[in-house]
Amino acid sequence: MLAAAEPAVAPPLAAAPDAIEAPAFEFDLPAQPLALALDRFADLTGRAALFSSTLVAGRTSAAVRGRLAPLAALQALLQGTGLEAEEVSAGRVAALVLKPAGPSPSAPVAAAPSTGQENYDSLIQARVWEALCAAPLTAQGGYRSLLRFRIDAAGRVQRAQLLGGSGDARRDLLLVEALERVRIGRAPPPQMPQPVTMLILPEQGGTPACASRGR
């Protein structure tokens, strides 16, 4: 599962119709802090990349120039960062997901000052998993889904949405209901971008998602 903070006004994630070639866009992006480059990429393409804010902290993008499809441009932008992009489909939605490229990043990463958001990202995931593991249908590890929500000043999840379905209508309903019951326990950091988007992926080897979380 990947939790990703997005700008308050995020471009819509692209639908994933079968066999449609991705359009190309004209890029002229200098090397810059990776978070800023990803924001510019989203503005140009209408495709949001999902990532944990702590994953991109201290990293610098590569310059990208020329006419490229979104995934190719994002891969070029990530050159030398130690990260890579993958396109993941959840229902009819295709998400561009950032992840470490391997155990040995190709460029050193500067230590970023702690803002408390790293711990809060982990807390969000822990509280969401607690809610999902409470019901057998959402605790299963063999599905993927894309969820979006906000966290209010009291630490409560609000405005939960299902962006990409799991393939089971009953499970989709339970996912949203579970999210709406989540209480993080404290307010989000003031600088945390919202809404938060969470991508749930099938567990490796078919292991139930909650088996390794004490169930």
Image (cartoon, helix red, strand yellow):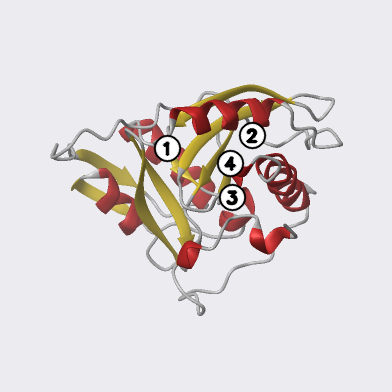
Q: Earlier in the sequence, mark 1 or mark 4?
A: 1
Mark 1–mark 4 Cα distance, whole angstroms, equals 26 Å
Residue 138's mark? 4
Please report whichever mark, 2 or 3, sits nearer to the chain's N-terminal start.
3
Give the residue type at disc 1.
Ala
Rendered view: 91 above or below 125: above
Q: Residues within 10 Å of mark 1 (few under 14, many from 20)?
A: many
**Relative image position of residue 38 (x, y in whole percent):** 45, 44
User: Residue 90: x percent and y percent?
Assistant: 38, 40
Instruction: Residue under label 2, please give it.
Output: 193
**In front: 57, or 164?**
164
Closest to the camera, between mark 1 and mark 4, is: 4
Residue type at mark 2: give it: Pro
User: What type is the residue that disc 4 sits on?
Assistant: Thr
Q: CA distance from mark 1 to mark 3?
A: 13 Å
| Residue 52, disc | 3
Numbered badge on residue 48: 1
